[in-house]
C-alpha cells in the first residue's frame, strides 16, 4: 500500500495505529517518543491523512499541500522562545477556533513537554471545545507531571526512536544513493528531517573535513583561530541553500494555489518570511552543534590513544579541551555572535 505513511519507516506499529484511526478521527492525538523519534514527521503525515478524502492517499491536492506544509486547514504552531508561554497559547486560540474549509481542521502543537506549569490552564482551554471537524496533534518527548490532564484527554501513539540504519534505508528508498544516505544518517543525530536535508547537501563531506582538521591547523596565533572560524561559517552558509530553495518552492506553490482559486496573492508574506528566517537560524545552530560534536570526537579519539601510552599530560589536555567544547555548545543555544564564539573557542584550545 502506498500512502502518506509509506515513507515513515522504522515505526510500523505507530503507522498501523495511525492508518486505523484516520477514518474515525479523535479530537486530540498525542504522539510520544524520545529525541530521535520521528514525532514531527509523524504529526505532518497524520495531519495529511486527516484532511485527505481517502485517508492519506498521497496523490491528491490535499495530501500534496499538507506534506508541503501549505494546506489551508493545517496549522503547525511555533514557539517564540524555548517554552510555550501563555501569550503563545493565547495566540493559538483564534486559529484553532476556525472552521475547516475542507474536510477537517488540524492543529499541530509540537513539544508540549515545553509548556510551563503556568501555561497549562490556557492550553487546556484551547484543547477544550474546538469546532466540530477539528483535531489536535500534540507531540511530546517526556511527561512532566503537570501534563497529566492533557495526556488523559488524548489518544496516545508511541513512536520509537529511529536507528541510523532505518534512517539510511528510508533515504535510499527515496532515491538517495547509498553512500550519501549513510553519511547523511550518521550526521543526522537520529533526526530524519535533518538527514533528508543533508542528503541534498553536497558540501557535507567537505564540512566534516574542515572540522576534523581544526586540531592540526590551530596555532597560538589569534589569526589562525579567526581564519578557521570564517572558513567554518562560510561552509555552514552552504547548508542553508537547500532550505532556501525549499522556502522559495513553498511560496511559489502557495501563489499557484491562490491564483488557481482566482485570488491575487496569498496573505501573510511577512509571517512566511519570518518563519523562514527562524528556520535558517535554527539550522545554523544545529549545524554548529554537529560541527562541535565532530571536533569533540577528534579530541576524544586522541584522548583514548593517549590513555594507553604514558602521555598522561596529553590526555589531561584533551579532557580540558572537551570541557571547552561543551561550554561553547551550551552558549550556542543563546543568541550569540557565532563568529566570536568560534574564534574564542579555537584561541582557547590553542592555548590549552
Ligand atoms: Zn490524499
Image (spheres, rainbow, N blue to C red):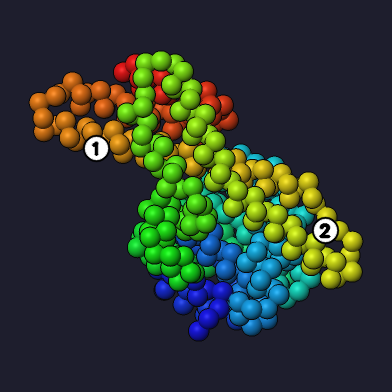
**Residue indicated by mark 1:** 301
Q: Position of residue 330 (x, y in %)?
A: 45, 31
> Dot 1: what SS?
helix
Q: Residues within 10 Å of mark 1 (few under 14, many from 20)?
A: few
Q: Residues within 10 Å of mark 2 (few under 14, many from 20)?
A: some
- Nearest to viewer (mark 2 / mark 1): 1
Q: Position of residue 32 (x, y in %)?
A: 47, 60
> Dot 2: what SS?
loop
Residue 71, placed above or below residue 287: below
Q: Is residue 174 left or right of residue 186?
A: right
**Residue indicated by mark 2:** 266
Residue 182 — which label? none
Q: Position of residue 128 (x, y in %)?
A: 67, 60
Q: Earlier in the sequence, mark 2 or mark 1?
A: 2
The residue positioned 42% from the left and 61% from the top of the image is 181
The residue positioned 35% from the left and 37% from the top of the image is 212
For residue 182, say whether it is visible. Answer: yes
Residue 161, placed above or below residue 51: above
Within the image, what quadrant is residue 100 found in?
A: bottom right
Q: Quick one: quadrant of the C terminus?
A: top left
Amino acid at each position: 500500500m502506498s500512502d502518506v505513511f509509506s515513507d515513515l519507516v522504522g515505526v510500523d506499529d505507530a503507522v498501523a495505529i495511525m492508518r486505523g484511526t484516520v477514518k474515525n478521527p479523535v479530537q486530540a492525538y498525542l504522539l510520544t517518543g524520545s529525541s530521535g523519534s520521528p514525532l514531527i514527521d509523524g504529526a505532518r503525515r497524520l495531519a495529511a491523512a486527516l484532511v485527505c478524502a481517502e485517508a492519506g492517499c498521497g496523490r491528491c491536492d490535499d495530501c500534496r499541500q499538507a506534506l508541503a506544509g501549505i494546506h489551508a486547514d493545517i496549522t503547525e504552531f511555533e514557539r517564540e522562545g524555548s517554552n510555550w508561554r501563555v501569550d503563545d497559547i493565547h495566540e493559538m486560540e483564534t486559529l484553532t477556533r476556525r472552521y475547516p474549509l475542507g474536510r477537517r481542521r488540524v492543529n499541530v502543537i509540537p513539544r508540549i513537554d515545553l509548556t510551563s506549569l503556568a501555561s497549562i490552564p490556557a492550553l487546556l482551554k484551547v484543547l477544550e471545545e474546538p469546532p466540530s471537524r477539528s483535531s489536535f496533534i500534540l507531540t511530546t518527548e517526556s511527561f512532566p507531571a503537570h501534563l497529566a490532564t492533557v495526556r488523559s484527554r488524548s489518544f496516545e501513539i508511541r513512536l520509537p526512536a529511529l536507528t541510523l540504519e532505518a534512517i539510511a534505508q528510508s533515504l535510499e528508498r527515496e532515491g538517495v544513493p547509498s553512500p550519501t544516505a549513510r553519511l547523511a544518517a550518521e550526521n543526522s543525530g537520529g533526526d530524519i528531517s535533518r538527514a533528508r536535508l543533508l542528503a541534498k547537501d553536497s558540501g557535507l563531506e567537505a564540512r566534516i573535513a574542515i572540522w576534523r582538521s581544526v586540531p592540526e591547523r590551530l596555532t597560538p596565533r589569534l589569526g589562525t583561530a579567526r581564519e578557521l572560524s570564517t572558513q567554518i561559517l562560510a561552509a555552514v552558509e552552504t547548508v542553508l541553500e537547500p532550505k532556501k530553495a525549499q522556502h522559495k518552492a513553498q511560496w511559489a506553490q502557495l501563489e499557484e494555489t491562490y491564483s488557481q482559486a482566482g485570488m491575487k496573492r496569498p496573505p501573510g508574506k511577512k509571517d512566511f518570511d519570518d518563519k523562514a528566517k527562524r528556520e535558517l537560524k535554527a539550522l545554523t545552530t544545529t549545524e554548529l552543534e554537529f560541527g562541535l560534536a565532530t571536533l569533540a570526537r577528534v579530541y576524544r579519539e586522541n584522548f583514548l590513544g593517549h590513555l594507553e601510552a604514558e602521555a598522561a599530560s596529553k590526555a589531561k589536555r584533551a579532557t580540558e579541551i572537551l570541557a571547552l567544547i561543551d561550554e561553547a555548545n551550551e552558549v550556542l543555544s543563546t543568541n550569540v555572535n557565532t563568529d566570536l564564539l568560534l574564534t574564542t573557542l579555537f584561541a582557547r584550545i590553542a592555548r590549552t
